[in-house]
Image (spheres, rainbow, N blue to C red):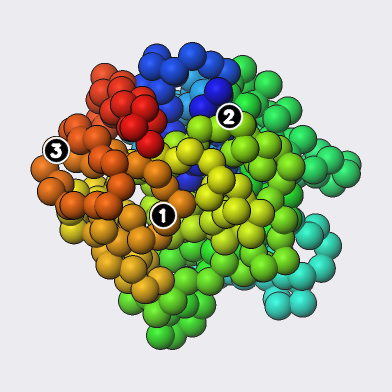
Amino acid sequence: MVTFLAGGTGTPKLLAGARRVFDGPHAVVGNTGDDVELGGLLVSPDIDTVLFDGGGVLDRETWWGIEGDTTETHDELTRLAAEAGIDAEPRYLPPEKQTTGRDIARWRRFSGAWEFMELGDRDRAVHVFRTSLLDEGRSLTEVTRTLADAFDVPEDVVPMSDDPVASIVHTPERELHFQEYWVAERAEPPVERVEFRGAADAEASDAALAAVREGPVVVGPSNPITSIGPMVALDGLRDALRDATVVAVSPFVADEVFSGPAAELMEAKGYEASTRGVADAYDFADAFVLDTDDGTDLARPVVRTDTRMDDDADARRVADAVRDALEVA
């Protein structure tokens, strides 16, 4: 079994190739630091990308949401907000509402009176189902596995924790939940620091710890700060990674990042925005997969290939390199 740490789109893209290279079944530990509660529904973007892709319904043009989904509910909410004169901006619930009620949604509750994230209708059904089972008393781990079964996902998909952890981006003007920073603000505000709120008190889920310990572990080319950082911030998971055999695929080619705000976030966390910075952040990694155009010299084994993944054939090529890196790790 191979265990993948998944956040954003990098690792889900890699999984398409890994399914053809490694004998299964495999496990996927999903980042929940950028989950949000929107209009009372818990949305788990990183986990849902894995679920939808594994179930063959992911919109691969955007790498989020369900292909061909309609947005009638979202569109009507947008119309109602406009008619009511509600400002078109993310609407945090009051501070006292952020820490009462459903514990798993702490520090990340938004009103649904104006949705800054577009939720498709089938996509929304997943969030209704997830939230309802949580309210019945099931853990996030149990609910995630139930959803994975419903989508017939070949991997054992589990969250990093059953406790709340919120990725908060601090800007000169105010603090933003990562989803507001990334989706609503398009990653435009300058970043002063990144906080994983609640991580000091949260525990890694038993399922996540078991998956990492059974390993080996593959960290795909996800954002090292907001996709992988919340997992590493959990003491138990960080310790388990240090004991495991770990291969990481860099999301950088030297000092150029493939996509997203990884460079700014790396610098805000005190790391160089480069492959070398990724290696510093991943001090638990035993070997790396780097792009053939990346000449970074690391003090750990390196396998090089073209790491850009535009289709499943690309993903298989990178997965082959991961297999080679595991052999020398």
Of the residues shown, which amino acid type is indicated by label 3?
Answer: Thr
| Quadrant including the C terminus | top left
| 149 over 326 or under it: above or below | above
Q: Where is residue 129 in the image (x, y as percent from the top left)?
A: 73, 36
Q: Which of marks 1 and 2 is nearer the N terminus?
A: 2
Inter-mark Cα distance, 3 to 1? 20 Å
**Residue 174 rendering spot, x and y as whole percentages:** 49, 82
Residue placed under numbered mark 3 in the picture: 292
Q: Which of marks 3 and 1 is nearer the N terminus?
A: 1
Real-space CA distance between mark 3 and mark 2, rounded to the nearest whole angstrom: 28 Å
Dot 1 surroundings within 10 Å: few (below 14), some, or many (20 or more)?
many
Q: Is residue 38 visible?
A: no
**Mark 1 is on which residue type?**
Tyr
Q: Distance between the residues labelled 1 and 2?
A: 20 Å
Residue drawn at x 70%, y 76% as measured from the top left: 94
In the depicted view, which residue is nearer to us: 105 or 257? 257
In terms of secondary structure, where does tag 3 sit? Answer: loop
For label 1, the residue is 282
Element assignment for label 1: loop
| Number of on-image labels | 3
Residue 206 in view here: yes
Q: Residue at x 57, y 18 (%)?
A: 25
Mark 2 = which residue?
A: 27
Which residue: 53% across, 71% down? 195
